Image (cartoon, grey):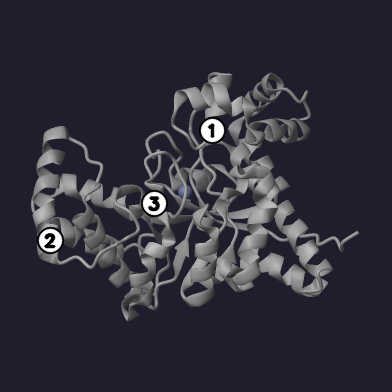
Amino acid sequence: MPPQIDLSAIPIVDHHAHALTKAVQIASLVQYQGYFSESPDPIIKARYVPDSIMWLWAIRELAGYLDCEPTAEAVFAARNARPIQELANGMWTDQNSVVLMIDYGFRSAENYTPEELRATFNQRVEMILRLETFAQDLILQHSTFSRMLDAFVAGVEGARAAGHIALKSIIAYRTGLDIAWTSRDDAVRAFGQVKDQADREGHIRLASKPLCDFLVLTALDIANRQEMPIQFHTGFGDTDVDMLKANPLHMRPLLQSDRFRKVPFVLLHAAYPYIRELGYLAAMYPNVYMDLSLAIPFITTQIPTLIHEALGLTPLTKVLYSSDAFSIPEIFWLANRWGRAGLEQVLSEIVQAGALTEAQAQWAGEQILSANARRVYQLA
Ligand SMILES: [Zn+2]
Protein backbone atom coordinates (compact mmCIF):
# COMPACT_ATOMS: atom_id res chain seq x y z
CA MET A 1 0.00 0.00 0.00
CA PRO A 2 1.47 3.38 -1.00
CA PRO A 3 1.08 6.21 1.54
CA GLN A 4 -2.26 7.94 1.02
CA ILE A 5 -1.88 11.63 0.28
CA ASP A 6 -5.13 13.40 1.20
CA LEU A 7 -5.67 16.80 -0.41
CA SER A 8 -9.36 17.19 0.47
CA ALA A 9 -8.73 20.08 2.87
CA ILE A 10 -7.02 22.19 0.21
CA PRO A 11 -9.31 24.76 -1.43
CA ILE A 12 -9.25 24.87 -5.22
CA VAL A 13 -8.39 28.14 -6.96
CA ASP A 14 -9.81 27.46 -10.43
CA HIS A 15 -7.70 29.90 -12.44
CA HIS A 16 -9.21 29.18 -15.86
CA ALA A 17 -12.90 28.53 -16.34
CA HIS A 18 -15.93 29.82 -18.20
CA ALA A 19 -19.34 30.98 -17.06
CA LEU A 20 -22.44 28.86 -16.47
CA THR A 21 -25.26 28.98 -18.99
CA LYS A 22 -28.41 30.83 -17.99
CA ALA A 23 -30.62 28.20 -19.60
CA VAL A 24 -32.80 27.26 -16.63
CA GLN A 25 -33.23 23.66 -17.67
CA ILE A 26 -31.54 21.63 -20.34
CA ALA A 27 -34.16 20.64 -22.88
CA SER A 28 -33.12 17.13 -23.90
CA LEU A 29 -30.75 14.33 -23.05
CA VAL A 30 -29.01 14.84 -26.40
CA GLN A 31 -28.40 18.49 -25.58
CA TYR A 32 -27.05 17.43 -22.17
CA GLN A 33 -24.66 14.99 -23.87
CA GLY A 34 -23.32 17.89 -25.91
CA TYR A 35 -21.66 19.38 -22.83
CA PHE A 36 -19.56 16.23 -22.35
CA SER A 37 -17.54 16.69 -25.53
CA GLU A 38 -15.41 19.43 -27.07
CA SER A 39 -16.66 18.51 -30.52
CA PRO A 40 -19.17 20.85 -32.17
CA ASP A 41 -20.32 18.00 -34.42
CA PRO A 42 -23.96 16.99 -33.82
CA ILE A 43 -23.28 13.35 -34.71
CA ILE A 44 -20.49 13.15 -32.14
CA LYS A 45 -22.72 14.75 -29.51
CA ALA A 46 -25.78 12.62 -30.22
CA ARG A 47 -24.32 9.26 -31.17
CA TYR A 48 -20.79 8.94 -29.82
CA VAL A 49 -20.75 10.79 -26.51
CA PRO A 50 -22.75 7.96 -24.87
CA ASP A 51 -19.95 5.57 -25.89
CA SER A 52 -17.21 7.66 -24.25
CA ILE A 53 -15.61 7.00 -20.87
CA MET A 54 -16.15 10.71 -20.17
CA TRP A 55 -19.91 10.11 -20.27
CA LEU A 56 -20.12 6.61 -18.82
CA TRP A 57 -17.90 7.42 -15.85
CA ALA A 58 -19.55 10.82 -15.35
CA ILE A 59 -23.03 9.30 -15.22
CA ARG A 60 -22.01 6.84 -12.49
CA GLU A 61 -20.24 9.54 -10.49
CA LEU A 62 -23.10 12.01 -10.87
CA ALA A 63 -25.66 9.37 -9.87
CA GLY A 64 -23.74 8.98 -6.62
CA TYR A 65 -23.79 12.71 -5.98
CA LEU A 66 -27.43 13.18 -6.99
CA ASP A 67 -28.51 10.00 -5.20
CA CYS A 68 -30.33 8.47 -8.16
CA GLU A 69 -30.14 5.40 -10.41
CA PRO A 70 -26.88 5.26 -12.43
CA THR A 71 -28.59 5.77 -15.77
CA ALA A 72 -28.34 8.74 -18.09
CA GLU A 73 -32.10 9.35 -17.90
CA ALA A 74 -32.16 9.32 -14.09
CA VAL A 75 -29.16 11.65 -13.79
CA PHE A 76 -30.64 14.02 -16.37
CA ALA A 77 -33.98 14.12 -14.54
CA ALA A 78 -32.35 14.54 -11.11
CA ARG A 79 -30.10 17.42 -12.19
CA ASN A 80 -32.99 19.21 -13.93
CA ALA A 81 -35.08 18.88 -10.77
CA ARG A 82 -32.58 20.97 -8.79
CA PRO A 83 -32.48 24.77 -9.02
CA ILE A 84 -29.26 25.81 -10.74
CA GLN A 85 -28.09 27.75 -7.69
CA GLU A 86 -28.45 24.71 -5.44
CA LEU A 87 -26.84 22.38 -7.99
CA ALA A 88 -23.84 24.62 -8.68
CA ASN A 89 -23.19 25.82 -5.12
CA GLY A 90 -23.51 22.27 -3.82
CA MET A 91 -21.04 20.91 -6.35
CA TRP A 92 -18.49 23.66 -5.70
CA THR A 93 -18.80 23.20 -1.93
CA ASP A 94 -18.53 19.43 -2.28
CA GLN A 95 -15.19 19.80 -4.09
CA ASN A 96 -13.93 22.68 -1.92
CA SER A 97 -13.68 25.16 -4.82
CA VAL A 98 -13.45 28.78 -3.69
CA VAL A 99 -12.26 30.98 -6.56
CA LEU A 100 -13.19 31.05 -10.25
CA MET A 101 -11.22 33.08 -12.76
CA ILE A 102 -13.62 33.52 -15.64
CA ASP A 103 -12.72 33.94 -19.29
CA TYR A 104 -16.11 35.43 -20.11
CA GLY A 105 -15.47 35.94 -23.84
CA PHE A 106 -16.85 32.47 -24.68
CA ARG A 107 -20.53 31.90 -25.51
CA SER A 108 -21.04 35.25 -23.76
CA ALA A 109 -24.59 35.84 -25.02
CA GLU A 110 -26.05 32.74 -23.33
CA ASN A 111 -24.02 32.85 -20.09
CA TYR A 112 -24.13 34.56 -16.71
CA THR A 113 -21.95 37.68 -16.72
CA PRO A 114 -19.17 37.80 -14.11
CA GLU A 115 -21.31 40.22 -12.03
CA GLU A 116 -24.27 37.84 -12.16
CA LEU A 117 -22.06 34.91 -11.18
CA ARG A 118 -20.84 36.86 -8.16
CA ALA A 119 -24.37 37.77 -7.15
CA THR A 120 -25.81 34.27 -7.63
CA PHE A 121 -23.18 31.73 -6.60
CA ASN A 122 -20.83 30.98 -3.73
CA GLN A 123 -17.50 31.47 -5.53
CA ARG A 124 -15.15 34.43 -5.51
CA VAL A 125 -15.19 35.47 -9.19
CA GLU A 126 -12.27 37.14 -10.95
CA MET A 127 -12.24 38.24 -14.59
CA ILE A 128 -9.89 37.50 -17.47
CA LEU A 129 -9.85 39.72 -20.58
CA ARG A 130 -9.99 37.76 -23.84
CA LEU A 131 -7.93 39.80 -26.32
CA GLU A 132 -9.24 38.59 -29.67
CA THR A 133 -12.95 39.05 -28.92
CA PHE A 134 -12.18 42.43 -27.33
CA ALA A 135 -10.34 43.45 -30.54
CA GLN A 136 -13.23 42.21 -32.71
CA ASP A 137 -15.66 44.57 -30.99
CA LEU A 138 -13.24 47.47 -31.44
CA ILE A 139 -12.75 46.74 -35.16
CA LEU A 140 -16.51 46.95 -35.63
CA GLN A 141 -16.71 50.20 -33.63
CA HIS A 142 -13.79 52.18 -35.10
CA SER A 143 -13.29 53.35 -38.65
CA THR A 144 -9.49 53.66 -38.71
CA PHE A 145 -6.64 51.47 -37.57
CA SER A 146 -5.17 54.11 -35.30
CA ARG A 147 -8.49 54.71 -33.49
CA MET A 148 -9.01 50.97 -33.09
CA LEU A 149 -5.44 50.55 -31.81
CA ASP A 150 -5.78 53.46 -29.36
CA ALA A 151 -8.92 51.86 -27.94
CA PHE A 152 -7.23 48.44 -27.76
CA VAL A 153 -4.19 49.87 -25.92
CA ALA A 154 -6.42 51.84 -23.55
CA GLY A 155 -8.50 48.73 -22.84
CA VAL A 156 -5.50 46.52 -22.14
CA GLU A 157 -3.71 49.19 -20.11
CA GLY A 158 -6.88 49.70 -18.11
CA ALA A 159 -7.73 46.02 -17.79
CA ARG A 160 -6.55 45.77 -14.18
CA ALA A 161 -8.36 48.95 -13.17
CA ALA A 162 -11.50 47.51 -14.79
CA GLY A 163 -11.21 44.42 -12.57
CA HIS A 164 -9.30 41.90 -14.68
CA ILE A 165 -6.51 39.88 -13.14
CA ALA A 166 -5.12 38.47 -16.39
CA LEU A 167 -5.24 38.57 -20.16
CA LYS A 168 -6.09 35.62 -22.38
CA SER A 169 -5.22 34.93 -26.00
CA ILE A 170 -6.88 32.42 -28.31
CA ILE A 171 -4.46 33.17 -31.14
CA ALA A 172 -3.82 29.41 -31.36
CA TYR A 173 -7.41 29.11 -32.61
CA ARG A 174 -7.13 31.98 -35.06
CA THR A 175 -3.72 32.05 -36.74
CA GLY A 176 -1.45 29.85 -34.61
CA LEU A 177 1.15 30.23 -31.88
CA ASP A 178 3.92 31.02 -34.39
CA ILE A 179 3.54 34.71 -33.59
CA ALA A 180 5.78 36.73 -35.94
CA TRP A 181 7.43 40.08 -35.22
CA THR A 182 4.99 42.25 -37.15
CA SER A 183 5.32 45.94 -38.02
CA ARG A 184 2.60 48.52 -37.59
CA ASP A 185 2.58 49.01 -41.38
CA ASP A 186 1.81 45.33 -41.95
CA ALA A 187 -1.00 45.51 -39.40
CA VAL A 188 -2.44 48.67 -41.00
CA ARG A 189 -2.52 46.96 -44.40
CA ALA A 190 -4.30 43.92 -42.97
CA PHE A 191 -6.78 46.12 -41.10
CA GLY A 192 -8.20 47.56 -44.36
CA GLN A 193 -9.35 44.16 -45.64
CA VAL A 194 -10.63 42.99 -42.26
CA LYS A 195 -12.55 46.21 -41.72
CA ASP A 196 -14.18 46.08 -45.18
CA GLN A 197 -15.37 42.54 -44.55
CA ALA A 198 -16.59 43.37 -41.03
CA ASP A 199 -18.60 46.33 -42.35
CA ARG A 200 -20.14 44.20 -45.10
CA GLU A 201 -21.09 41.32 -42.82
CA GLY A 202 -21.85 43.17 -39.59
CA HIS A 203 -19.75 40.77 -37.54
CA ILE A 204 -16.18 39.53 -37.53
CA ARG A 205 -14.11 36.50 -36.66
CA LEU A 206 -10.63 37.98 -36.44
CA ALA A 207 -8.25 35.60 -38.21
CA SER A 208 -5.79 37.85 -40.03
CA LYS A 209 -2.27 36.81 -39.09
CA PRO A 210 -0.57 40.25 -39.28
CA LEU A 211 -3.37 41.81 -37.23
CA CYS A 212 -3.60 39.00 -34.65
CA ASP A 213 0.19 38.90 -34.22
CA PHE A 214 0.52 42.69 -33.93
CA LEU A 215 -2.28 43.00 -31.37
CA VAL A 216 -0.96 40.16 -29.21
CA LEU A 217 2.55 41.65 -29.31
CA THR A 218 1.09 45.04 -28.34
CA ALA A 219 -0.77 43.45 -25.43
CA LEU A 220 2.40 41.60 -24.36
CA ASP A 221 4.34 44.90 -24.23
CA ILE A 222 1.69 46.32 -21.90
CA ALA A 223 1.61 43.11 -19.84
CA ASN A 224 5.39 43.32 -19.51
CA ARG A 225 5.23 46.89 -18.17
CA GLN A 226 2.47 45.94 -15.72
CA GLU A 227 3.80 42.45 -14.92
CA MET A 228 0.34 41.13 -15.76
CA PRO A 229 -0.14 37.39 -16.45
CA ILE A 230 -1.45 36.19 -19.81
CA GLN A 231 -3.07 32.84 -20.52
CA PHE A 232 -2.59 31.29 -23.97
CA HIS A 233 -4.73 28.55 -25.36
CA THR A 234 -2.28 25.78 -26.35
CA GLY A 235 -2.91 22.25 -27.59
CA PHE A 236 -6.28 20.67 -28.24
CA GLY A 237 -9.67 22.33 -28.31
CA ASP A 238 -12.62 22.20 -30.63
CA THR A 239 -12.25 21.59 -34.34
CA ASP A 240 -11.35 25.14 -35.40
CA VAL A 241 -7.90 24.83 -33.81
CA ASP A 242 -5.09 23.88 -36.21
CA MET A 243 -3.29 21.46 -33.92
CA LEU A 244 0.00 21.81 -35.80
CA LYS A 245 0.05 25.52 -34.93
CA ALA A 246 -1.09 24.92 -31.33
CA ASN A 247 2.24 23.43 -30.24
CA PRO A 248 3.73 25.78 -27.62
CA LEU A 249 7.23 25.21 -29.03
CA HIS A 250 6.17 27.81 -31.64
CA MET A 251 6.41 30.40 -28.85
CA ARG A 252 10.16 30.00 -28.35
CA PRO A 253 11.09 33.27 -30.15
CA LEU A 254 8.82 35.19 -27.76
CA LEU A 255 10.22 33.39 -24.73
CA GLN A 256 13.84 33.79 -25.85
CA SER A 257 13.39 37.51 -26.41
CA ASP A 258 14.11 39.81 -23.47
CA ARG A 259 11.07 41.86 -24.39
CA PHE A 260 8.53 39.90 -22.33
CA ARG A 261 10.62 38.66 -19.38
CA LYS A 262 8.22 40.16 -16.82
CA VAL A 263 5.11 38.57 -18.33
CA PRO A 264 3.97 35.39 -16.59
CA PHE A 265 2.95 33.13 -19.52
CA VAL A 266 0.36 30.60 -18.36
CA LEU A 267 0.08 28.02 -21.13
CA LEU A 268 -3.27 26.27 -20.92
CA HIS A 269 -4.64 22.73 -21.30
CA ALA A 270 -1.32 20.97 -20.66
CA ALA A 271 -0.90 21.85 -24.36
CA TYR A 272 -2.30 18.34 -24.76
CA PRO A 273 -0.99 16.26 -26.49
CA TYR A 274 2.17 18.44 -26.39
CA ILE A 275 2.46 18.06 -22.62
CA ARG A 276 6.15 17.13 -22.74
CA GLU A 277 6.92 20.17 -24.90
CA LEU A 278 5.07 22.42 -22.46
CA GLY A 279 6.72 20.77 -19.46
CA TYR A 280 10.08 21.46 -21.05
CA LEU A 281 9.27 25.15 -21.65
CA ALA A 282 8.04 25.57 -18.07
CA ALA A 283 11.22 23.94 -16.80
CA MET A 284 13.48 26.16 -18.96
CA TYR A 285 11.89 29.62 -18.75
CA PRO A 286 11.27 31.31 -15.37
CA ASN A 287 8.12 33.07 -16.61
CA VAL A 288 6.36 30.03 -18.16
CA TYR A 289 3.71 28.12 -16.19
CA MET A 290 1.90 24.92 -17.04
CA ASP A 291 -1.86 24.54 -16.67
CA LEU A 292 -3.57 21.12 -16.63
CA SER A 293 -7.14 22.01 -17.58
CA LEU A 294 -9.31 20.56 -20.29
CA ALA A 295 -7.06 17.51 -20.33
CA ILE A 296 -8.58 17.29 -16.84
CA PRO A 297 -11.40 16.14 -17.07
CA PHE A 298 -11.60 15.10 -20.74
CA ILE A 299 -8.80 12.53 -20.85
CA THR A 300 -10.51 10.73 -17.94
CA THR A 301 -8.58 7.59 -16.96
CA GLN A 302 -5.35 9.10 -18.36
CA ILE A 303 -5.41 11.99 -15.86
CA PRO A 304 -2.87 10.35 -13.49
CA THR A 305 -0.55 9.68 -16.45
CA LEU A 306 -0.83 13.34 -17.46
CA ILE A 307 -0.03 14.53 -13.95
CA HIS A 308 2.98 12.19 -13.76
CA GLU A 309 4.26 13.67 -17.03
CA ALA A 310 3.67 17.19 -15.76
CA LEU A 311 5.49 16.71 -12.46
CA GLY A 312 8.45 14.66 -13.69
CA LEU A 313 10.39 17.57 -15.17
CA THR A 314 8.67 20.80 -14.21
CA PRO A 315 9.22 22.53 -10.82
CA LEU A 316 6.21 21.99 -8.55
CA THR A 317 5.64 25.72 -8.15
CA LYS A 318 5.04 26.08 -11.91
CA VAL A 319 2.18 23.60 -12.40
CA LEU A 320 -1.38 24.88 -11.95
CA TYR A 321 -4.63 22.97 -11.73
CA SER A 322 -7.78 24.42 -13.29
CA SER A 323 -11.00 23.02 -14.77
CA ASP A 324 -11.61 24.99 -18.00
CA ALA A 325 -15.20 24.01 -17.20
CA PHE A 326 -18.09 25.75 -18.93
CA SER A 327 -21.86 26.05 -19.07
CA ILE A 328 -22.98 23.42 -16.51
CA PRO A 329 -21.86 22.75 -12.90
CA GLU A 330 -21.27 19.06 -13.59
CA ILE A 331 -18.15 19.76 -15.70
CA PHE A 332 -16.64 21.80 -12.83
CA TRP A 333 -17.48 19.05 -10.34
CA LEU A 334 -16.03 16.24 -12.47
CA ALA A 335 -12.84 18.19 -13.23
CA ASN A 336 -12.34 19.11 -9.57
CA ARG A 337 -13.07 15.56 -8.39
CA TRP A 338 -10.96 13.73 -10.95
CA GLY A 339 -8.19 16.34 -10.86
CA ARG A 340 -7.81 16.18 -7.09
CA ALA A 341 -8.04 12.38 -7.01
CA GLY A 342 -5.47 12.06 -9.80
CA LEU A 343 -3.10 14.40 -7.99
CA GLU A 344 -3.51 12.44 -4.73
CA GLN A 345 -2.80 9.17 -6.52
CA VAL A 346 0.28 10.48 -8.33
CA LEU A 347 1.74 12.19 -5.26
CA SER A 348 1.20 8.98 -3.27
CA GLU A 349 3.14 7.04 -5.92
CA ILE A 350 5.92 9.64 -5.92
CA VAL A 351 6.23 9.29 -2.14
CA GLN A 352 6.30 5.52 -2.50
CA ALA A 353 9.10 5.88 -5.05
CA GLY A 354 11.06 7.77 -2.40
CA ALA A 355 11.23 11.00 -4.43
CA LEU A 356 9.24 13.17 -2.02
CA THR A 357 8.45 12.91 1.67
CA GLU A 358 4.79 12.88 2.67
CA ALA A 359 5.13 16.45 3.90
CA GLN A 360 6.67 17.54 0.60
CA ALA A 361 3.89 15.80 -1.34
CA GLN A 362 1.23 17.57 0.74
CA TRP A 363 2.98 20.87 0.06
CA ALA A 364 3.13 20.08 -3.68
CA GLY A 365 -0.61 19.36 -3.74
CA GLU A 366 -1.31 22.67 -2.05
CA GLN A 367 0.87 24.53 -4.56
CA ILE A 368 -0.82 22.94 -7.58
CA LEU A 369 -4.44 23.30 -6.42
CA SER A 370 -4.18 26.69 -4.78
CA ALA A 371 -0.97 28.48 -3.93
CA ASN A 372 0.63 28.69 -7.40
CA ALA A 373 -2.43 30.44 -8.82
CA ARG A 374 -2.64 32.80 -5.83
CA ARG A 375 1.00 33.77 -6.39
CA VAL A 376 0.98 34.03 -10.21
CA TYR A 377 -2.17 36.17 -10.28
CA GLN A 378 -1.31 38.05 -7.06
CA LEU A 379 -4.65 37.17 -5.46
CA ALA A 380 -5.10 38.93 -2.17
ZN1 LIG B 1 -11.07 27.81 -21.66
Q: Is residue 196 above or below residue 45?
A: below
Task: Say which amino acid is labelled 2.
Answer: Asp
Furthest toward the front, the residue is 244
- Disc 3 on helix, strand or loop? helix
Question: Can the viewer see residue 369 in this picture?
Answer: no
- Name which residue lies at 76% across and 26% down: 70
Q: Looking at the image, is mark 2 or mark 1 earlier in the sequence?
A: 1
Task: Say which amino acid is labelled 1.
Answer: Tyr
Residue 6 or residue 42, whichever sits in front: 42
Q: What residue sits right under mark 3 in the picture? A: 244
Whole-percent x, y for residue 251 in the image? 37, 65
Q: Does residue 153 appear to the left or right of 57 in the view shown?
A: left
Residue 239 or residue 233, whichever sits in front: 239
Q: What residue sits right under mark 1 in the picture? A: 35
Q: Does residue 4 appear to the left or right of 93 in the view shown?
A: right
Q: Looking at the image, is mark 2 or mark 3 earlier in the sequence?
A: 2
* Nearest to viewer (mark 1 / mark 3): 3
- Give the numbered dot on residue 110: none
Whole-percent x, y for residue 342 in the image? 71, 53
- Badge 2 crowding class, 10 Å Cα cut-off, few under 14, some 14 to 19, many 20 or more, is few
- Name which residue lies at 44% across and 28% down: 41
Furthest toward the bottom, the residue is 258
- Badge 3 crowding class, 10 Å Cα cut-off, few under 14, some 14 to 19, many 20 or more, is few
Whole-percent x, y for residue 44 in the image? 51, 27
* Mark 2 and mark 3: Cα distance apart in space: 24 Å
Q: Is residue 323 above or below residue 167?
A: above
Q: What residue sits right under mark 2 in the picture? A: 186
Whole-percent x, y for residue 90 in the image? 68, 41
Task: Mark 3 and ligand 1: say if the CB distance to the nearest ligand atom is below 8 Å.
Answer: no
